[in-house]
Amino acid sequence: MKRQVESNIPTKYGNFKMIIFSEDDQDLKPHFALCHPSMNVEEAVSVRIHSECLTGDLLGSFRCDCGEQLDTALKIIGEQKGMIIYLRQEGRGIGLINKLKAYNLQDTGRNTIDANTDLGFQPDQRKYPMAIEILNELGISKIKLITNNPRKIEAIEASNIKLEERIPLVIPSKAENEEYLQVKKELMGHLLG
């Protein structure tokens, strides 16, 4: 995976530099980093590793907390001069089609883990080596990780990147996602307070 292109992106959270990473420039779903222009790689950088969630990130779905996590993380990296690594692994790595099939199973009473396993997948198929690769490519050796997910913490701790701090990213539940968040906390070990 290599850096393909970068461009300035002004947003409501501030101005950022978007850097695209992929094997080649024909990739239609590349990973990317959104970096504050004053990010200092000599110090611990505030980093959110965020997996794509079209329904939450783009449509503001209340079935999950992903969109609100992304929104909050963008505010944090704007204030702390950090970065977001956006990984294209929709639906915990099962893709958008299977994610919606899992939603349909959840509508019949299955929880998010059971729905994925009913479809023949692991509860969470996401992987994080690409995030480590992006951090290394950008010269970042120590981070403050914006997460509640213990698997992301483990991925960083197993890498050459030093985890200096975890920044919690707890979003208040809504009626539509209360059970989902409970499953994340009780069955997946997410650090939700």
Image (cartoon, grey):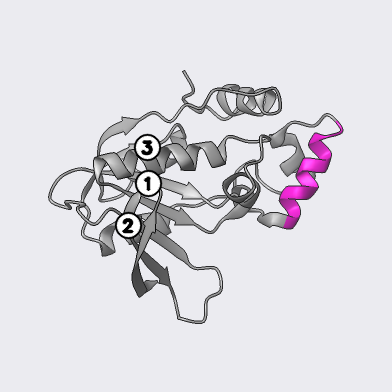
Disc 1 crowd, CA 10 A, few/some/many (<14, 14-19, 20+) = some
Q: Which mark is residue 126?
A: none
Q: Please tell me whether mark 1 sits on a helix, a strand or a loop.
A: loop
The magenta segment is 97-108
**Residue 119 in view in this figure:** no
The residue that appears at 59% across and 49% down in the rendered structure is 53
Q: Which mark is residue 16?
A: 2
Q: Where is residue 167 shown, x and y percent of the image?
A: 34, 31
Left or right relative to 113: residue 152: left
Please identify, in this view, whether the residue under mark 1 or under mark 3 is nearer the observer: 1
Q: Where is residue 187 shown, x and y percent of the image?
A: 61, 26
Q: Where is residue 93 shown, x and y percent of the image?
A: 60, 53
Q: CA distance from mark 3 to mark 2?
A: 18 Å
Q: Residue furthest top?
A: 193
Q: Which mark is residue 146?
A: 3
Q: Residue furthest left?
A: 42
**Which residue bears the numbered disc 1?**
13
The residue that appears at 55% across and 52% down in the rendered structure is 52
Q: Please tell me whether mark 2 sits on a helix, a strand or a loop.
A: strand
Quadrant that contains the N terminus:
bottom left
State yes or no: discs 2 and 1 in contact (Cβ < 8 Å). Answer: yes
173 above or below 78?
Answer: above
